[in-house]
Image: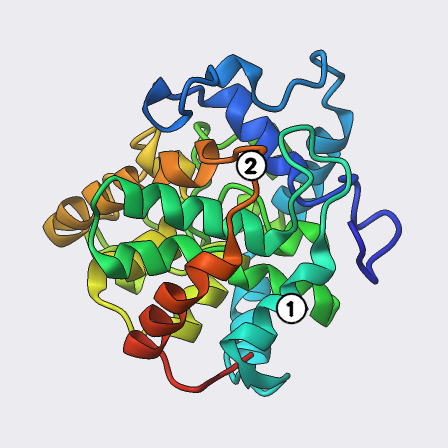
Amino acid sequence: MKSTQQGDQNPLENLDVWEEDLLQRYPDPESITKGKTTEKYRDYETPARDTVKEFYRLNHTYQTYNFVLEKEREFLKFDKKEMPIWDAFDFLNQLVDDSDPDTDLDQMQHLLQTSEAIRTDGHPDWMVLVGLLHDMGKVLCLFGEPQWAVVGDTFPVGCAFSDKIVYSEFFENNPDHHDSRYNTQYGVYTPNCGLRNVHMSWGHDEYVYQMLKDHLPEPALYMLRYHSFYPQHRENAYEHLMDSHDHAMFKWVKLFNPYDLYSKNPVPPNWKELQPYYKELVAKYLPATLKF
């Protein structure tokens, strides 16, 4: 992967190593894989996961309540760059991953494969668009953010960290774990306050949600905002913060997740054929330019 980030803050060889680890932790039914069993995805002959472990050590050490508030103030002004969506895809493609064993396609083609799998199954056009846009927030890497503040399983901050979060033992290094304001079950929140009132760990999910929240229907926004919230949509670890509306909306998050993880295919999408459809789809929902 081409990135300006170097050094100890970026232990993963590339951002997709996080998804490789997800596929090992959460093998899914075969419905999206089109004849390729889930066991055949991310076949690295089961290597040691030292880099993933180090990634989560950093993530769990530094993703504090105050860190998240600081990043929200910094990035949610959307004053870094403004460009048409298609220029944004070119920008995102600077994160091409040359070592992914499932595909040698660039980021845009991966997003097209996700969206095309959704379209093939007859889902609404706004969900197809979510497939196309869900990883747009990874441009944070190109704005100088370290890997642990871009990808990774997301979780609430400002309250006790669940032991259902992967590598939860590393929260021992997080200052909030020892702070009485933040280390109780509810912390700064109230029972069943609703996730709209909860600050999530900082990364590409929250960033792309905030970028698009005025343009897409609510189920789409839940997919964008919580598609990496595995402690809840796979482990049900934060029922105590969710309200009835969250529970109703999470059916959409669970519907989207397999398309994200299991739609990769060695056959490149034919962009020349697909372009008219996607140009029209983007124009239907989004402005001519987006602010990053």
Q: How many marks?
A: 2
Location of residue 58 in the rendering, given as x and y in whole percent from the top left corner? 71, 44
Q: Nearer the viewer, residue 126 or 208?
A: 126
Q: How was the colour assigned to the protein in this rendering?
A: rainbow
The relative height of residue 198 versus residue 83 in the rendered view (above or below) is above
Q: Residues within 10 Å of mark 2 (few under 14, many from 20)?
A: few
Q: Please, what secondary structure does the residue beneath circle 1 have?
A: helix
Q: Which residue is mark 1?
A: 90
> Is residue 220 in view from this perspective?
yes
Badge 1 amino acid: Asp
The relative height of residue 64 versus residue 37 in the rendered view (above or below) is below
The relative height of residue 190 versus residue 154 in the rendered view (above or below) is below
Q: Nearer the viewer, residue 1 or 180?
A: 1
Location of residue 183 in the rendering, given as x and y in whole percent from the top left corner? 45, 45
Q: Quadrant of residue 145?
A: bottom right
* Residue at point 37%, 50% (across, down): 226
* Residue at point 29%, 32% (across, down): 236
* Residue at point 23%, 46% (across, down): 252
Q: Please, what secondary structure does the residue beneath circle 2 have?
A: loop
* Residue at point 57%, 84% (across, down): 83
In the picture, the quarter occupied by the C terminus is bottom right
Name the side, left or right, on which 184 lies relative to 42.
Answer: left
Location of residue 76 in the rendering, given as x and y in whole percent from the top left corner? 50, 78
Location of residue 116 in the rendering, given as x and y in whole percent from the top left corner? 38, 47
Q: Earlier in the sequence, mark 2 or mark 1?
A: 1
Badge 2 amino acid: Val
Q: Which residue is mark 2?
A: 267
Q: Quadrant of residue 137?
A: bottom right
